[in-house]
Image (cartoon, grey):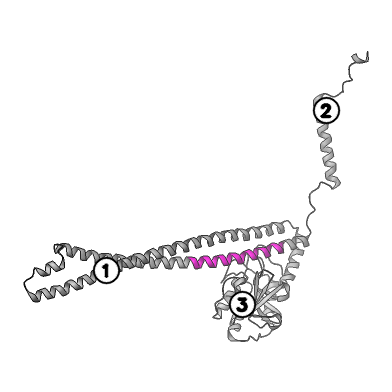
Amino acid sequence: MAAHRKSKQSPLGGSAVRTAATLALASAATATLFDGSGHADPRPTTAQVKAKVDRLYEEAEVATERYNGAKEKADEARAAFDRLRDEAARRTQRLNTARDALGAMAAAQYRSGGLDPAVQLALTSDPDQYLERAALAEKAGDRQAAAVTAVRRELAAIRQLRGESAGKLTALRGHEEELRRQKATVVGKLAEARTLLARLTEEERARYDAAAAARDGSGAPAPADGASGTSSPALRADRSSGGERGPVTAPNARAAAAISFARAQLGKPYVWGATGPSAYDCSGLTQAAWRAAGVSLPRTTYTQINAGRRVSLSQLAPGDLVFFYSGISHVGLYIGGGQMIHAPRPGAPVRIAPIDEMPFAGATRVG
């Protein structure tokens, strides 16, 4: 009897069972979410955002200096390529002239019947005329030989120039590719920093700006994207006070001229890759300042640090270049009293700041 008894049916159909199971799983997931074990990462604090943004700005500046270096090399390669191309054009013109001269000689020979000069001379009966024609034939032969030599020389020179040009063009394309890579890195880092800052509330942004202003020594917040070069009243006051700290005793006239130029740039915006006159990055500012003093500096922080005599922190004098971070990715112009003029970062215009606000890496005297 038990073997023939039907099993007890569930009061719910198959579809209803599946629906119930789905709801149960969803409820469990929701419970897990609100338990805290499955919720999204907590919102970063203002201090965490500041630390990450500072790191992104530093990485962007490293990429900026690499971009500057690649651009300098690309400019040099382009100039060399242009010089070779111009020289090849001049050589080609000389080649055409030599060819024309050789062609004129060949045409003259054809008109004279193509006879060997010795045969033509033997046919004349006038001894004086014979000697005169002999001298002329010798000169013509010399001219023809010289014309052939000129053609060969220009052909060889043009082949060499074309080979050198091909090498310079290859180098130029490599530097341009490096430019594109570093530009993409800079743009990406700055975009990531802007995205992080955009997530802050007004109150958090105010705290961030205050901390950034204290770090940069500006006494006033600045826009995060560096798009505006207009300084706030507080920044203008800081510029005024910074400019009135008393006369700076520079060791020589060139150092004084470099400092004077840098002071005139206070308040101008930081723009990566810029060398003035309306905006600067850090090495672009120091390069422009010393150029105004009659001294040519290389473009990047990595090369500027080797452009003069190294000096220690205790030996600093106004006009020295001061470098920061282990990668030598930032530079300022020392003005005395533990202060420098520098282009800090996007959103922070050219300003006076203490040199102890960043990790000191070395100093160079170029004047």
Q: Position of residue 151 (x, y in %)?
A: 30, 66
Of the pair 228 and 299, the residue shown nearer to us = 299
The rendered magenta stretch, by its main secondary structure, is classed as helix
Q: Is residue 88 left or right of residue 322?
A: left
Q: Which residue is mark 1?
A: 147
Q: Which residue is mark 2?
A: 17
Mark yes or no: residue 154 visible: yes
Asked whether the residues under the numbered discs 2 and 3 touch, taking CB atoms below 8 Å apart as contact, a structural biologist would say no
The residue that appears at 63% across and 78% down in the rendered structure is 263
Q: Give the mark nearest the N terminus, 1 or 3.
A: 1
Residue 102 falls within the magenta-colored stretch: no
Which residue is farthest right?
1
- The quadrant in which residue 299 appears is bottom right
* Residue 127, disc: none
Asked which secondary structure carries label 1, the reply is helix
| Magenta segment boundaries in residue numbering | 53-77
Q: Is residue 47 above or below residue 4?
A: below
| Left or right relative to 168: residue 344 | right
Nearer to the camera, 2 or 28: 2
Q: Secondary structure at mark 2?
A: helix
Residue at image mark 3: 262
Residue at 66%, 78% in the rendered image: 363
Please name the amino acid that badge 2 sits on: Val
Quadrant containing the N terminus in the rendered view: top right
- Pair 2/1: label in front: 1
Q: Quadrant of residue 217?
A: bottom right
Q: The disc labelled 3 sits on which kind of residue?
A: Ala
Tell me the quadrant of the picture where the C terminus can be found: bottom right
**Spatial separation of the CA atoms under disc 2 and disc 3:** 78 Å
